[in-house]
Amino acid sequence: MKVGESVNEYFARTFTIANKIRVHGEKMEDIVIIEKILRSMTYKFDYVVCSIEESNDLDTLSIDMLQSSLLVHEQCMTGHLEDEQALKETETKAHYAEASGEMLLMAYVDVKEASKEELWFLDVGCSNHMYGKKEFFSRFDESFSISVKLGDNSSMAVIGKGNIQMIVNGIVQVITNIFYVPGLKNNLLSVGQLQEKGFAKM
């Protein structure tokens, strides 16, 4: 069985080969086909193959019954993968959620010792870059206005956005679309926003 091949595809391919062998005069009983199928399934079917071998008399097991058992297992695995993917997509959307005009800020760290202008916190849950000192902005848009919701369910006002220059590994980088939040004690860099702009390995 090829990696990524479905049970139905594998059985169809196996039957084609078995029929060609039979056409050439070689006798091939169903038990031989069943044993070959069980021996050649991919590793993700290991435990179901063991279960089938232990709980069934292979001499009385039909190919249809074997195929049905493997299909049920395949459908269960597919369902688990879809559930995991849906959960990941939900988590991703939650980080960028907007509700009632408030941009969701998933995490907010209140560390008084880290209130210097040059100190930034990388935040995987923060939906947008945040900065608390207006004088460091360039290309500042004062018309932008929104509120951010913090992890403790309180809110802070955003009264503009712009760009800020910072030195990263000795190179001057311009970080764009930073929210100006007066009174913000810690400057926050959104990891998600950096990745969108190609700074994943910054």
Image: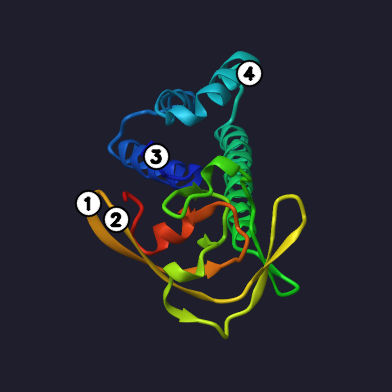
Question: What's the residue type where badge 3 is placed?
Answer: Thr
x, y percentage for residue 48? 57, 25
Q: Which residue is mark 1?
A: 170
Identify the element where label 2 is drawn.
strand
What label sits on residue 14 in the rendered view? 3
Q: Find out whether the residues at labels 3 and 1 contact each other: C-beta distance under 8 Å.
A: no
x, y percentage for residue 111? 60, 42
Q: Which residue is mark 4?
A: 56
Q: Between label 4 and label 2, give the one nearer the viewer.
A: 2
Alpha carbon distance from label 2 to label 1: 6 Å
Q: Residue shown at 34%/40% (left/top)? A: 17
Q: Quadrant of residue 182?
A: bottom right
Q: Which residue is mark 2?
A: 167
The one nearer the camera, 84 or 199, is 199
Label 4: few (<14), some (14–19) or many (≥20) C-alpha neighbours in 10 Å: few
Question: What's the residue type where badge 1 is placed?
Answer: Gly
Question: What's the residue type where badge 2 is placed?
Answer: Ile
Mark 1 / mark 4, whichever is N-terminal: 4
Identify the element where label 1 is drawn.
loop
The one nearer the camera, 23 or 49, is 49
Mark 3 / mark 4, whichever is N-terminal: 3
Residue 82 falls left or right of residue 199: right
Mark 3 / mark 1, whichever is N-terminal: 3
Q: Residue shown at 51%/64% (left/top)? A: 133
